[in-house]
Image (spheres, rainbow, N blue to C red):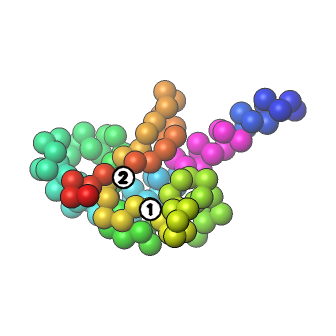
Amino acid sequence: MSNLDSAIDELNEYERDLTEYSDYIKANSNTEKLKLLSKLRAFDVETLEKHGIYYIADMADMIVPKYIPKLDSFGIISETNKKPIFNGRWIIPIYDSNHMIQSLVGYSPYA
């Protein structure tokens, strides 16, 4: 296997893991918060759901045992205090053209 093939395999594994992780968190998030975001930003809830947006109430919600070894690579651990960076935020996944998540962005209308 060439270095390029190996790098592509690693990238594909990362994308699958981050997408699976985000889907897991989303499935366990507070759906009432989508209604609030819908009202605040004038998007209907269906649009928010379609784009995979979800809410993180507490940074501890992002600690999923299966993914602990990968949280640093997902970019959700602060280099300053080594804690998850999203707290009281709606999470907006950034997708590629294959609908694989590349990154996560946190949004708060109050911060």
Numbered badge on residue 85: 1
Figure quadrant of residue 14 = top right
92 lies left or right of 110: right
Q: Is residue 15 magenta?
A: yes
Q: Secondary structure at mark 1?
A: loop
Locate the C terminus by quadrant: bottom left
105 lies left or right of 49: right
Q: Amino acid at mark 2?
A: Gly
- Residue 52: horizontal and vertical position, in percent? 36, 45
Cβ–Cβ under 8 Å for marks 1 and 2: yes
Pointer 2: residues within 10 angstroms few (<14), some, or many (20+)?
some
Q: Is residue 36 visible?
A: yes
Residue labelled with disc 2: 106
Residue at position x 59%, y 50% from top?
Answer: 17
- Between the C-alphas of marks 1 and 2, the distance is 9 Å
- Comparing 67 with 71, the one in front is 71
User: Residue lying furthest right in this view?
Assistant: 1
- Residue 75: horizontal and vertical position, in percent? 54, 53
- The stretch in magenta equals 10-19
Locate the N terminus by quadrant: top right
5 lies left or right of 73: right
Residue at position x 36%, y 46% from top?
Answer: 92
The answer to whether residue 86 is above or below residue 96 is below
